[in-house]
C-alpha cells in the first residue's frame, strides 16, 4: 500500500507542477516521459534477468493463466453491460467501445472521438485513466482480497508498461512474464475492439 501511495503522490505532484507551471511548458512537449518509462522498463527487465529463477518459474505456471487476457476482456465487457443498464443515456455499444480501451486511454479516446465525437472520446479518456490509477493504487488490496491475478487483470493493457513495476512489487517476479503477456494481448485487442464497437 505504501508503494501505491508514493506513486499517487508523484502523480498529484506532477499535476500541481503542471498547473502552476513550475517547469517550462516546452519540457512537457519533449519525449522525457517516454524515456523515463523506458528507464523503468529497463530496470524491471534487469531485475528479471538477474534472477534466473524468474524465467524458469514460467514452466511451473498453470497454462490456463494464458487465458487471463481473454478473461479480462470478457469481464470488462460484462461490466460495460451493467454500466449500460445503470447509464441509460449511453447505449450498449458505446459502453463497450469505452470499456474496450482496457486502460489504453491515448489510443482508444482518439479512435472513439473520430467515430463517435468528442463527448464519448472524453468519457473514454477519463474512464481509462481511472482504470490505470485504480490499478496503481489498489494493487495491494486487490492482491490481498482476490489473489495475484487480480491486479494484472485490473491493469488491462497497461500491465506491460506503466503498471508493470507495481505489479512486480505486489505480485512478485514470478508474474512478470504473465503481466507482460497479458499486456501485449490486451494492448493489441484495443484497436480492433474499439473500432468494432464504434462501427456497430
Image: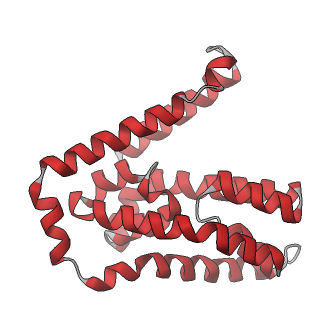
The structure residue drawn at horizontal position 46% and vertical position 75%, both measured from the top left corner, is 69
Does 89 sit left or right of 55 as displayed?
Answer: right
The structure residue drawn at horizontal position 89% and vertical position 59%, both measured from the top left corner, is 117
Q: Nearer the viewer, residue 199 or 5?
A: 199
Q: Quarter holding the C terminus?
A: bottom right
Does 116 sit left or right of 14 as displayed?
Answer: right
Does 200 sit left or right of 75 as displayed?
Answer: right
Give the image location of residue 195, x and y in percent.
Answer: 74, 71
Does 132 sit left or right of 119 as displayed?
Answer: left
The structure residue drawn at horizontal position 18% and vertical position 50%, both measured from the top left corner, is 49
Q: Is residue 118 above or below residue 56?
A: above
Count of numbered marks: 0
Give the image location of residue 145, x and y in percent.
Answer: 36, 70
Residue 86 visible from this viewpoint: no
Q: How is the image coloured?
A: secondary structure
Q: Is residue 50 above or below residue 34?
A: below
Residue 59 visible from this viewpoint: yes
Q: Nearer the viewer, residue 136 or 174?
A: 174
Identify the image quadrant of residue 86. bottom right
Give the image location of residue 183, x and y in percent.
Answer: 45, 63
The structure residue drawn at horizontal position 70% and vertical position 83%, both measured from the top left corner, is 81
Amino acid at each position: 500500500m505504501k508503494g501505491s501511495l508514493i506513486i499517487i503522490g508523484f502523480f498529484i505532484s506532477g499535476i500541481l507542477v503542471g498547473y502552476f507551471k513550475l517547469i517550462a511548458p516546452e519540457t512537457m512537449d519533449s519525449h522525457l516521459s517516454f524515456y523515463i518509462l523506458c528507464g523503468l522498463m529497463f530496470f524491471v527487465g534487469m531485475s528479471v534477468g538477474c534472477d534466473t529463477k524468474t524465467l524458469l518459474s514460467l514452466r511451473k505456471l498453470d497454462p490456463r493463466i494464458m487465458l487471463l487476457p481473454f478473461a479480462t476482456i470478457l469481464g470488462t465487457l460484462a461490466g460495460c453491460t451493467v454500466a449500460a443498464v445503470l447509464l441509460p443515456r449511453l447505449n450498449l455499444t458505446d459502453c463497450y467501445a469505452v470499456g474496450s480501451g482496457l486502460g489504453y486511454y491515448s489510443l482508444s479516446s482518439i479512435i472513439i472521438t473520430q467515430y463517435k465525437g468528442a463527448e464519448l472520446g472524453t468519457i473514454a479518456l477519463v474512464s481509462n485513466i481511472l482504470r490505470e490509477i485504480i490499478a496503481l493504487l489498489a494493487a495491494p488490496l486487490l492482491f490481498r482480497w482476490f489473489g495475484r491475478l487480480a491486479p494484472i487483470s485490473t491493469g488491462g493493457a497497461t500491465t506491460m508498461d506503466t503498471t508493470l513495476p507495481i505489479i512486480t512489487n505486489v505480485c512478485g517476479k514470478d508474474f512478470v512474464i504473465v503481466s507482460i503477456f497479458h499486456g501485449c494481448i490486451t494492448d493489441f485487442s484495443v484497436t480492433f475492439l474499439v473500432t468494432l464497437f464504434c462501427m456497430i
